[in-house]
Image (cartoon, rainbow, N blue to C red):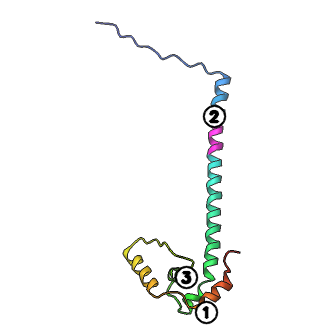
Amino acid sequence: MPETVTSTPPRVQRTPATDLSAFREAEQAELDAQIAELHDQSTRAKVAAKESEDAARAHAFNFLVAEGIVGSLVEAAIRFALSKPEISTAMIGTASLDQFEQAVAAANRGPLPAAALERLTRIHPGPA
């Protein structure tokens, strides 16, 4: 019967230098992960602040809906674009046939009334 030879893998000699190197690598990986998380948190906070600013600005135009001038702020945006002769093309994005039909209905209502445009200009004068 042949003799079975088993070999033991060579042991890696651990030295203080290899232990320190492994420790540094692990520490760097942990720091990198913490930095990435802080960056993600900061980015989320900035996005939330921007969304809050945008929502506050949009609320200034709610009088259009409240007074029945438009049915929604989406309609207001489409009709605003139609009110400006310097705007030759307005691109809209729709995710459904219903949204497309709403956009067509808004366009069919035509431009915003002059009085509404005047109020909008007082709220947001536009670029200087």
Quadrant showing the N terminus: top left
Amino acid identity at mark 1:
Ala
Residue displayed at 55% across by 81% down = 85
Q: How crowded is mark 3: few (under 14 residues within 10 Å), some or many (20 or more)?
A: some
Question: Which is the main secondary structure of the residues drawn in magenta?
Answer: helix
Location of residue 99 by image quarter? bottom left
Answer with the quarter of the image where residue 77 lies: bottom right
User: What residue would you read off at disc 2?
Assistant: 25
**Left or right placement of residue 42 versus residue 105 in this view:** right
Question: Does 29 appear in magenta?
Answer: yes
Amino acid type shown at disc 3: Phe
Mark 1 or mark 2: whose residue is earlier in sequence: 2
First to last magenta residue range: 26-32
| Mark closest to the chain's N terminus, 3 or 1 | 3
In the image, residue 16 lies in the stretch drawn in magenta? no
Q: Name the residue under label 1.
A: 115
Residue highlighted by disc 3: 80
At mark 3, the secondary structure is helix
Residue contact between numbered discs 1 and 2, judged by CB atoms under 8 Å:
no
- The x and y percentages for residue 125 are 68, 80
